[in-house]
Amino acid sequence: MTVPALLPAPPSAPPTSPVAASYARLAEVFPGLRMEEPARDERLPSGAGWIGADELAAGGPRLDAFLAWDDAQVLRDHGTRARPDVVAGFGLHRYAWPACLLVTLPWFLDRRVPRLPVRSVAFQRALGRMAVRVEEFACLPGDPAAALPGARVVADEEALRAEVRASLAEHLEAVLDGFGPRMRRGRRALWGMATDEVVEGLWYVAALLGEERRATAELELLLPGTTGPYKPYAGGAGFRELAGAEGTDGAPRATRDRATCCFFYTLRPEDTCLTCPRTCDAERVRRLTATA
């Protein structure tokens, strides 16, 4: 994600925002991504590089223009053009990865789950900014935020996890409708990509927060499988220990196998993602050891 050296300060969040603290934590550890909430009497931003999630979901010329950025980036960085379906996959990833954090991060940090239909989110990719309007959210009994407008109290942790799955599914289902025809993948494969974005976004940010172990445990509970209440997600969190790549505390590091492949290897066959099914454990250990 391309981010300028200095980002303009986001406007102050509404005083009754249930998610502002979580989004502020994100900005502290990952300044390349800012999440802001316009005042209740303000519209979501548009123009100047902004695009609404509802515009991505609709497909058409606005989505084509969005994907033209990815097409140009691939040509600029790799000196070759990617297949149109690969470009669409890159574009989906660059939207869905931060969009999933709009829901998973407040859940992980504060046990609050915003409901975000596509009309409530806008994205400015070049600046690494998302604008979001939270009109409804779920929380647990005893949460002070239960007195805020739009709050809906649920019984327990599992009920709250169900709210996370439902909120993400509502948002991603619409977005996949827009991207799907350009990606030449079946519905299960599309949901495999979405599942990977849900898991790997929070996993990454939680590591920056120093809470990777808790995140992997929470994500295993959130996405333990693909049947019954866990549909339409195509795959579980699927974490496992990677022997031979111990962290600074001596404990084995976590890894997982993505449910789908992003097809980056079609540009550079020798370069696969760390969690790609094509990347063997020995190669994962080598890369992690080199990084450490």
Image: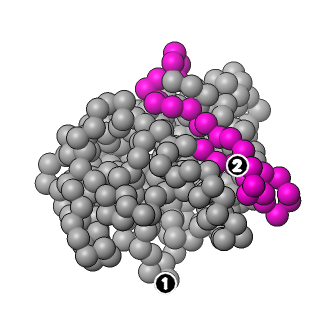
* Residue 122, visible in the rendered structure: no
Is residue 18 positioned above or below 220 on the image? below
Return the residue at label 2: 242
Check disc 1 and give the amino acid type.
Answer: Ala
| Residue 77 spot, x, y in % from top left | 32, 76
Return the residue at label 1: 5
CA gap, disc 2 and disc 1: 35 Å
| Residue 30 spot, x, y in % from top left | 59, 67
Who is closer to the viewer here, 192 or 167?
Answer: 192
The crowd level at tag 1 (other Cα within 10 Å; few <14, some 14-19, many 20+) is: few
- Look at the image and say whether residue 230 sits in the magenta stretch: yes
Residue range highlighted in magenta: 227-256
Label 2: element kind: strand
Q: Nearer the viewer, mark 2 or mark 1?
A: 2
Among numbered discs 2 and 1, the one appearing first in the sequence: 1
In this rendering, position of residue 225 left or right of residue 1: right
Quadrant of residue 138 within the rendered picture: top right
| Residue 225 spot, x, y in % from top left | 57, 25
Label ID, residue 88: none
- Look at the image and say whether residue 21 sits in the magenta stretch: no
Check disc 2 and give the amino acid type.
Answer: Leu
Identify the image quadrant of the C terminus.
bottom right
Q: Residue at x 21, y 56 (%)?
A: 83
In this rendering, position of residue 186 left or right of residue 195: left
| Residue 183 spot, x, y in % from top left | 25, 44
Who is closer to the viewer here, 134 or 14?
Answer: 134
Count of all numbered marks drawn on residues in the image: 2
Is residue 173 positioned above or below 75 on the image? above
